[in-house]
Amino acid sequence: MQGNDIVDLSLAQTQSNWRRKGYLDKIYNANEIFLISSAENPDVMVWLLWSMKEAAYKIHNRKTGIREYAPKKLVCSVLSTADLTLGMVNIDEAIYFTKSSINSAYLHTISSPVQHQLDKIKISIYEFPNHLSNYRDTKPACVSHHGKYLALTY
């Protein structure tokens, strides 16, 4: 099982005012808010943590069949921030491992309940207008789209 999330950083910057009063408290726990406030680039950290939560949630929802909007129940730990950011997301009794890549245009996260499976996930990212119109025919394991980006994992 795998999860996948992509964030169009340009769109996120224009559509979301995460600095407004109370926004962070609704989505992030105290440790995550500390990571955001102490980050070199707080904007990217907000979306990194969000993307980790989303990618893990996609697996958790498929495993449990439970659909709920409870982002604070998904607790993120960032383990390393080199070219690829490795992390973990805990929810209930489950742990999901994440790997995120960040560039100036988008942030992309994959997740798996088994850490070594992260290296086996194949990723295809498309930018509009070059999206695959028939991407479902490629039978992706997980689909994510935001703004002008489409991310498929296999």
Image (cartoon, grey):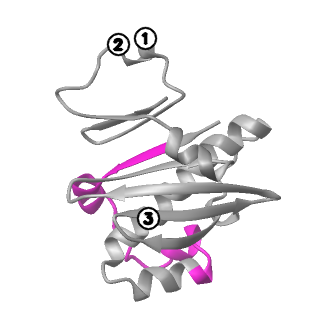
**Residue holding disc 1:** 137
Residues at circles 2 and 3 in contact by the CB criterion of under 8 Å? no
- State the residue in front, 85 or 44: 85
In the rendered structure, which disc, 2 or 3, sits on the residue that comes first in sequence? 3
Check if mark 1's residue and mark 2's residue have beta carbons within 8 Å: yes
Label 1 – label 2 distance at C-alpha: 6 Å
Q: Quadrant of residue 46?
A: bottom left
- x, y (%) of residue 139? 49, 17
Give 149 or 69, whichever is nearer the viewer: 149
Report the label total: 3
Secondary element at tag 3: strand
Label 3 sits on what residue type? Answer: Thr
Q: CA distance from mark 2 to mark 3?
A: 31 Å
Q: Which numbered dot is residue 134? A: 2
Bounds of the magenta segment: 4-31
Residue at point 61%, 56% (across, down) = 97
Q: Is residue 142 left or right of residue 126?
A: right
Q: Which residue is mark 3?
A: 85
